[in-house]
Structures are given as structure tokens and as C-alpha cells.
Amino acid sequence: MPFVELDTNLAAERLPPELPQKLCAASAAILGKPAERVNVTVRSGLPMVVSGSAEPCAQLLVSSIGVVGSAEQNKAHSARFFDFLTAELGLGTERIVIRFYPLEPWQIGKNRTVMTFL
């Protein structure tokens, strides 16, 4: 059950239509998870600084069980997420930062329990 959060200082009007749905589909493909299990949040218009500059930028946080736990996995994911984000947001790679966080099943609550028991 991946959680994908995109924060950007770009105004909402500058974001492509259907960006949350597109990011959901891309995340599912990149992480090898069904889209029905992917959770996406897009926050725009935030006061942000990346690499010391408030120029247009974005930060992506990707948290998931089992697919973001190694440098090798994240190197492959990173390349594909950067391809998606640069194309959709029109930002250079130097203006995007991605953070990967591995999760354990007991850290995600769903249906009044945690994923460990589902």
C-alpha cells in the first residue's frame, strides 16, 4: 500500500489536469503495485526552498511496504519518478527531490486493524 505525496511551490493552475490520477497510475507502474492500493496526495502553492532556492521546485515522498527498502530498488524507482515529474511539471531534475521510506505492515492502519492482519 504505497503512499505518494507530492509537494510543490507551483500554483495549482500550473499543474496538469488530472495530476493526482496520473501520479497514481505512474506510481503503481513504477512500484509494481495495483493502482487500487496507491494513495496519492498533491499539495501545490507551498512556500518551499530546494537547494537554497525558492525557484519552482517539488519534493516527492514515497512510502511503501517491501518495494523501497534498498538502494538498488530506489535507484530504479528514482529514475522513473524523475522522468514522470520532469515531463508533467516542466521542472529540471535539479529542482526535484525524492525521499523514499520503507514501511512495515504494522505501521499502516486499514479497516480497523493494521496491514499485518489483512
Image: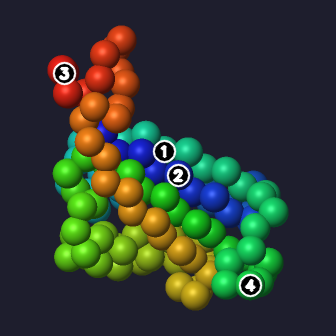
Residue bearing mark 2 = 5
Spatial distance from mark 1 to mark 2, Cα to Cα?
6 Å
Which secondary structure, mark 1? strand
Residue type at tag 4: Gly
Spatial distance from mark 1 to mark 3, Cα to Cα?
21 Å
The earlier-in-sequence mark between 3 and 4 is: 4
Disc 1 to disc 2: CB gap under 8 Å = yes
Q: Using the image, tell me which numbered label, if any, was put on residue 52.
A: 4
Tag nearer the camera, 1 or 3:
3
Q: Which of 32 and 111 is in front in this view?
A: 111
Which secondary structure, mark 3? loop
Disc 3 to disc 4: CB gap under 8 Å = no
The earlier-in-sequence mark between 1 and 4 is: 1
Tag nearer the camera, 1 or 4:
4
Spatial distance from mark 4 to mark 2, Cα to Cα?
21 Å
The earlier-in-sequence mark between 1 and 3 is: 1
- Asked whether the viewer can see residue 37, the reply is no
Spatial distance from mark 3 to mark 4, Cα to Cα?
43 Å
Mark 4 packing: few (<14 Cα in 10 Å), some, or many (20+)? Answer: few
Q: Residue at x 43, y 40 (%)?
A: 39
Specify whether 57 is left or right of 76. Answer: right
